[in-house]
């Protein structure tokens, strides 16, 4: 059994981790920390876990996380970078669901996240946890930077084209729509039900923190910088991301075949038949990314539709997938749920 | 492996059965029928099942259901009563998710359902599939009448009081609220998104078909007729039923303790601490019923809150629970999902 | 022109007041106060008001409210009771949308609201602003206590029965469902979109502040105390209250006719044909209350369905109706909007 | 008073027309037709209109529409083209809310709409009813082709750039999101609440009928053909369209100033401050289009955000705006409602 600790378990990625790990046959949940809720039973805060999780939240200083085999950080940005070193030194493997280790260029990270990085050396070591790109490195990693939700949907949707070098790289467009759980479980006015329901809006158009992360991933695949316009939107649903991706063809290919080959054997990427229109609910509460290709009117613009559940493949599910890889388990363990529809 | 067939798989109870059975370790899905969709891959209609269910819908006449061990009817009312006899004669065990075998009094059934019953003898044989009441009979049943969604929530909420004989029986009130999936996957105007969203209304106040079913169950426990006012409402959510139940105390009891004892050992009934207020999402996509007791202002009116997922404990989950019992399996097999929250 | 000031305009009742008053032909908006947002243009916070309201929020101390003819308090409980006296002394007429002046029994108010009342004498003077009960007193009032949202729906639904003395008074039940805007525009976790959407729950079952207010209104009509069980629920919609009211008949009447007569001539109460089932959207963004009567199965329990928009007839609309009465205007001025459907 | 008839009043554009016209001070509603609902009181189908509209639906053959001054067609495509001629000959002015007269090129129309056009000569005469482009022609028109919802949002968002000739014309992108009421009030499975709620998807990616309409409008402004990729999406809200528009700059301009000048004096176009992010609810139930400009990262891609209410400015509101122009009324008559927020 893998002894697992979770740092910061009161948010949506925390409760989603608990949902997935509570029935993972190879995991023993050791501790889940929360400064504010120490002493509260986890199942009192999240009644969905009654009878499934018997732990109480503990104060971080009482958590003995260094006795775990794996620790997940489901914390705000800036926490894991302060605590990861000690855990790694104690032989614990660490998966950060926040952004602390995602961006290799420290200056870029510091600009977008507005703080000084506390552990630049660990950034260099950390493996970006997108298994469809870095599977072998993840298996050996001590420290995994779990990707952001938009970056997961956008990269999985665009990478085959970038890797094949068949689209224009300077004017890519990612028009993305996220369910409101993507904003986290924070008491903020703009994500109140009466504000976000029956409403649709763009946000972060001037610059969203996931932009440099997507760019980094695409640039790595392209071997050069790419130009990307990324516009996120808030849509009135709880879970789900729908990325609508636009790229201009520079060299003809059988694009459908390109995607099918690229993702052949990938357990969590489903290339749908050409001209499909995946809906986000088709992946609700599951770790699957579904992708479909379009070439409207036979023009030179490809439209790629990519959907994930932002809390599962976009966060906690992918983190468990990474843990499975790091510990030599079947990659799909505890992740084979059928999506919940309707 | 239990060979399973499903009659009528294009509705919400059908797709929910498929979600649960697709990963049932003791089940082999043999056939799923649909007159209108014969030849269509199930996963083309419900992309959530891509990679999980490889069957195509078949025409009922081509389905060879008599070679199955168990057949579920996820059909409109009036179908199972015509087809069950032949299957039972062939040694198949039958679970009807519709209402054909729920009401013991044929005249009452015919009045409420507006048709002549085709198999009154089977009504007599059928076991009402509420395991919390009829577990032993279900184990031995050839034919199970799976309860309705409102009746499941209302009976589980009221039975301990009725059985204990401590409330007034002539003026019970069940004010129930259902998500829209309870109306089925039918192309009807009143359940369109633009009609049912951001809206709330009562329906069937003059008389809903679940009324005689609830009354029958309560009367059986009381040993006499009961008076019940049942008002169902449509609430803008997909899944979930919330029953708010009112009963007047005629004999004092430790009601909390009464419920805890009544449901001790029940794997799918969670009696919450007194004064809890369960939300429907705490059971979303799971087979659990959560119940909480209130005695507002210390008066003589008890308020019982009972929540289920109408498609799981209220339909397909309970049907699988019944199948597990009928075939001597662990009752919880394939039903231990953690609810999806948020 | 009536010079109007609004104290506390950043919540939902504030913005609804602005929506209604911005096009009131007899109103000149003079000032709208907010401690936290002083200096912000109202239309920057609520872009729906761009081009309609040119005011900025001002700090209360700079507002010169005593130069107004009428001041609305759209503040939390406990504010108006401190400021009303000075305004009244300056000749301003005051309408409080909070609860400070609703409960005549000071001890009861202090128990439920958890504070010492600052102006008991004004409570005695204040007129409870339910025009269907107190129209003539409102016309002459200096100070109006605008009713709560649940109390408006519940009282309008039950009063004809109580006044006629034809139902049992000790076991009335009000099972009420509210849209989430009823909880206000406060940054609280439980009303986040990802918490309140696709979910349904009861709250305040042990005791909600609107209980004594409803009881007071019913008792006044009955001429004696009444017994009422009141269970409020949160339903995933923005606006609307649906009250499902249960009363036991003690004397037969033509109840439909009773309601029609009681509300004949009332511009904002619509008694629908018997057995109607009003949906909340039929009054969305309008000042109308629609009521329908049922007698399920011909039994002795009457079911009354009463719907309002909690922000309009349940708050700001009724406040404007009261202002119209207080200033001798046509009661419907600026309130004749057709509900928004779908 | 303008005598008005409506052909086909049972859909969402019909009931929205009724909402707006019921309180238009210069309009007398004469007749509203429906084949299926003849004899039904309009307010029985749409209780929001109780007390506001006393008409019954009449069969088209009994409607005496030729005695009207103006007739609106709120019908499916293909009806108005058969009936408009007779009405025009009788001196009636006609506004078609469907697509029959929107596309000037008959062959293009017939290809996209899959039928033979019944009145090509009227297409030539019809004025495209986008007042911000064709105001003077609309004033004199006998026959107005009311624009589609997506075309209204997309054209108002892109026209200033096209007219100024400062963006690349071959690779425009319109990524548009619509509320579900845009699909109409039709009993179809895919727009059921339980299908469309908590879900997001693209549709019509291969080609949507509004594509040629948008292209025609942009080409007219450009003086040449334009290349446009148009991807519509269904978002779980009732009303609203959000168009996210991408264009590459070919000549620098003060774009903010360009838009402000283009729409100076337009009563229903609100150019917001640069970098605003309009939400659809800021125009809910109103005739306003709000537009905001972005230039992410200072790159060469302009992002224009354009929001409307699809049923008001995108359909019935614009139709009333056109009627006001055609009859010499103040363009804003009956259209000055403040948007409903929240």
Image (cartoon, coloured by chain):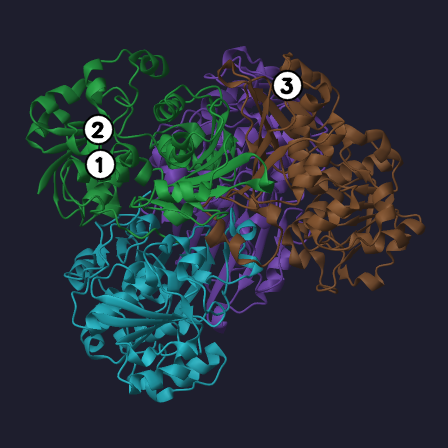
Chain colours: A green, B cyan, C purple, D brown
**Are discs 1 and 2 less than 8 Å apart at CB?**
yes
* Nearest the eye: D33 or D162: D162
Disc 1/disc 3 C-alpha distance (Å): 54 Å
The location of residue A277, given as percent across then percent down, is 48, 47
Task: Give me the chain letter of mark 2.
Answer: A
Of discs 1 and 3, which sits in the foreground? 1
- Establish whether labels 2 and 3 are both on one chain: no
Identify the residue position indicated by label 2 in the image: A144
Tell me residue B36's x, y (percent): 50, 69
* Residue occupying the point 23% across, 19% down: A123
Q: Secondary structure at mark 3?
A: loop
Q: Which residue is under mark 3?
A: C54
Q: Which residue is outermost to the front?
A: A252
Residue B73 vs residue B259, the one in the foreground: B73
**Residue picked out by circle 1:** A322
In the depicted view, which residue is nearer to us: A328 or C236?
A328
Residue C142 visible, this angle: no
Quadrant the N terminus of chain B occupies: bottom left
Both marks 1 and 2 on one chain: yes
Residue D301, above or below C295: above
Give the mark, 1 or 2, whose residue is nearer the N terminus: 2
């Amino acid at each position: 059994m893998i002894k697992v600790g979770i740092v910061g378990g009161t948010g949506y990625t925390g409760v989603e981790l608990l949902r997935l790990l509570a029935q993972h046959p190879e995991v023993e949940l050791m501790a889940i920390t929360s400064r504010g809720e120490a002493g509260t039973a986890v199942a009192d805060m999240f009644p969905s876990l009654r009878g499934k999780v018997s732990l109480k939240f503990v104060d971080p200083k009482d958590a003995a996380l260094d006795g775990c085999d794996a620790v997940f950080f489901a914390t705000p940005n800036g926490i894991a970078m302060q605590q990861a070193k000690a855990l790694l030194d104690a032989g614990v493997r660490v998966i950060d669901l926040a952004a602390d280790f995602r961006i290799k260029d420290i200056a870029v990270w510091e600009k977008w996240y507005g703080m000084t990085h506390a552990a630049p050396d660990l950034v260099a070591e950390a493996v970006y946890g997108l298994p469809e790109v870095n599977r072998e490195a993840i298996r050996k990693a001590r420290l995994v930077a779990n990707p952001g939700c938009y970056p997961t949907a956008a990269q999985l949707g665009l990478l085959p084209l970038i890797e094949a070098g068949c689209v224009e790289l300077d004017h890519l467009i990612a028009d993305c729509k996220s369910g409101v759980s993507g904003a986290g479980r924070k008491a903020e006015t703009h994500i109140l039900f009466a504000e976000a329901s029956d409403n649709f809006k763009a946000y972060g158009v001037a610059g969203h923190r996931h932009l440099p992360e997507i760019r980094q991933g695409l640039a790595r695949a392209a071997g050069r910088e790419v130009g990307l316009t990324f516009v996120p939107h808030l849509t009135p649903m709880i879970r789900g991301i729908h990325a609508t991706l636009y790229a201009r063809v520079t060299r003809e290919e059988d694009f459908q075949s390109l995607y099918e080959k690229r993702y052949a054997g990938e357990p969590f990427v489903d290339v749908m038949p050409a001209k499909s229109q995946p809906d986000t609910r088709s992946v609700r509460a599951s770790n699957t990314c579904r992708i479909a290709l379009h070439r409207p009117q036979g023009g030179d613009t490809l439209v790629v539709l990519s959907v994930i559940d932002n809390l599962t493949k976009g966060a906690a599910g992918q983190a468990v997938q990474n843990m499975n890889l790091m510990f030599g388990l079947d990659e799909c363990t505890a992740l084979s749920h059928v999506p919940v529809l309707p």
